[in-house]
Amino acid sequence: MSTQSAAMSRPAGDAVLLVEDSLPERTRLRFILERGGYRVLEAGDGDAALEVLAAEPVNLIVSDWQMPRMSGVELCRKIRQELQLDNCYIIMLTGRSSRKDTLEAFDAGTDDFLAKPVDRDELLARLKVGRRLCKLQADLSQQYQQVQESLTREQQARALVDEDLEAASLLQRELLPPQFGQHPGLDVAHLFRPAAGLGGDMLNHVRLDTHRVGFFLLDVCGHGVAPSLLSFAVAHALGEMFADAGGDVRPHELLQSLNRRFHDRSGNGRFFTIALGIMDLRDGQTRICQAAHPPPLVIRHEGEIEPVPGGGVPVGVFADAQYETCEVLLQPGDQLLLFSDGLTECESAEMEQFGDERLHDLLRASQGLSPEHVLELVHETVTDWCGDDTLEDDLSVMILARQHEVGEGRRRFELMSRAEDIADTVDALREWLGANGVAEGLGFEFAVCVAEALNNVEEHGYGEESPGEIVIDCRLQIDAIECEIIDHAVPVTEMPSADLSPGDVENGRGWFILKSWMDRVEYVPAVQGNRLRLVKFKDSRRQKGAPD
Amino acid sequence: MALENRTLGNAQIITMPARLVKADAAPVREALKSLIGEGKNRLVLDMAATEFADSSGLSVLISALNSAKESGGEVVLLNPTRPIRSLLELTRLHHVFQIFEDADAAAASL
């Protein structure tokens, strides 16, 4: 501080621009200023002053008011407006002092006045004030710039982190099974809503062999980067375990080995809860093992809700923890619901948890609906309960539903994106829909939309010159017809226009038809290419345009 | 591609194919255009057999209408099946085309 104020007290060669038309007066003032330690630049009139300033932006300016051609006030205005020199201190030397003149000079950008004849000490004192103000302003603007720079760096770093998180979150979604899947006789649907972009929850269902499906839903304590990394690792390990699982493996054996592998030696509190099971697709015999997880619920097709008994400590806490396998029998039409505690523990604005009772009531009320529909209701109800879209905790739910009958409920079509192939495939699709009892009008609308989607892939995805493969995975649900159209063409970044101009030949009215007749049109993220999911509900009350 | 057609009054009744999608569009479009080129520009498109169409199929109908009108003619539709009618209505083409259920009435309108 002391060195700074010492520096302040002496001008140390600071430059002053002296503008004065009278040579004797200018000489006198220059003498005063130089004796005061300033470096003096001189100008005999306003124009000369502007030239000097253009070459060297001086911070301190002492100017006479009354000068031929350009007055001091005019000069002042030009300095502020044309040269835009904000950080300079202008002292006007004046013989007059009318209120109006003074106000005009202030308005033009004058900082201070000094009466003529100029008093030596007063001039130096006022210049000292000027220097202090200029320094203050320069410091401030430098600090502001530094803050700006560090803010920009911060933002860039933040953007990089966000980008990484975004990529990780996409990767996490890629690890999930398709939102709606099937095994012979079993429909599976899931809902996955991480609280932050990255969740600590993970779920999957995989075929172990011709007749068994392994499934799990886990919840790593916390959410964000570290828990999600652990959930990645556990999901990966479970994938391997399922792949190696022999015919007779029981879930608690898998869980015990998982527990040994992920034992939290560091004591960092990295543990997780899980529900894990293996289902025999032939008879619905299901073995389930839990580790401190919300008990899975069996939803009987008659509407009863039965929690699967279990318990256990979280995985990772004790290396020698023992778990139990529980057997339940799922009859055709029964559903098994697995969920993380984000579902029942999500809180309303009044801090009341959603709770088991409400969940059971909801499930009873949605009896007989397809898993997709049940999940939709669960999602809506819970979001309503929380009151907004942001969740406190990760929310994941998976439903495994034994189909009423194993039938021709699913069909896969493979084709090339050529008009002929598309026409043949759509014919086959119409035939299949008809053979499976889909009403004529419904089947027609569905088939037209599929045709439009395929035409779109042909024209805008692969391009007519370079046809590529398309797969259509078509499923008949109890309450809906749905399909996924999968291609490896250029990823769609923009939805086609759904505008309609009836008399236009060229106008692709295809997307308009698609959007009008399908109840769901959504692009599901894909590693490469596109997955377009189309759903048409059978129940007209759920279709588009149906009254709420 | 030759489309089955017969004369009724001063109109041509054209039997449209069972399927009218993108793969079928070009030949039908050309066939209709060449009829119009021959001066047969009053067309009744008999849609009774057409079970399925997509937006490219619809554009065939519109381009026929446009060519016919250029030479002072007209195109009307006859007996579309229920699904096709719903497609025409969805895309508001029932405001662009006159639709008849009776061939004589359709021909008489031209």
Image (cartoon, helix red, strand yellow):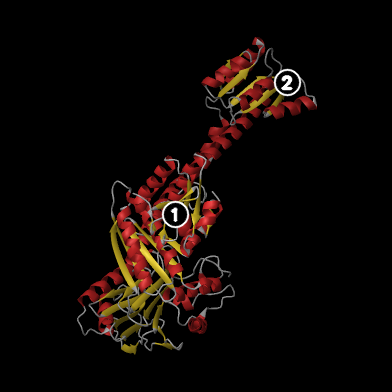
Q: Are marks 2 and 1 in contact (CB under 8 Å)?
A: no
Q: Chain of mark 2?
A: A
Q: Are marks 2 and 1 on the same chain?
A: yes
Secondary element type, mark 2 = strand
Task: Tell me what residue is drawn at x 32 percent, y 47 percent.
Answer: A464
* Front: mark 2 or 1: 1
Image-quadrant location for residue A118: top right
Q: Is residue A147 above or below residue A345?
A: above
Judged from the image, the secondary structure of the residue bearing numbered disc 1 is helix
Amino acid carrying label 1: it is: Gly
Toward the viewer: A179 or A230? A179
Give the x, y percent position of residue A338: 39, 79
Based on the displayed image, in which of its 4 quarters is residue A295 positioned? bottom left
Q: Which residue is mark 1?
A: A510
Residue A259 seen in the current view = no
Query: Label 2: which residue?
Result: A94
Tell me the amino acid under the disc marked 2: Thr
Towards the viewer: A230 or A460? A460
* A363 w.r.t. A534: above or below: below
Q: How many marks?
A: 2
For mark 1, does the 10 Å Cα neighbourhood hold few (<14), some (14 to 19), or many (20 or more) residues? Answer: many
First in sequence: mark 2 or mark 1?
2
The relative height of residue A144 versus residue A329 in the rendered view (above or below) is: above
Where does the image place residue A7, in percent across and percent down from the top left?
Answer: 53, 33
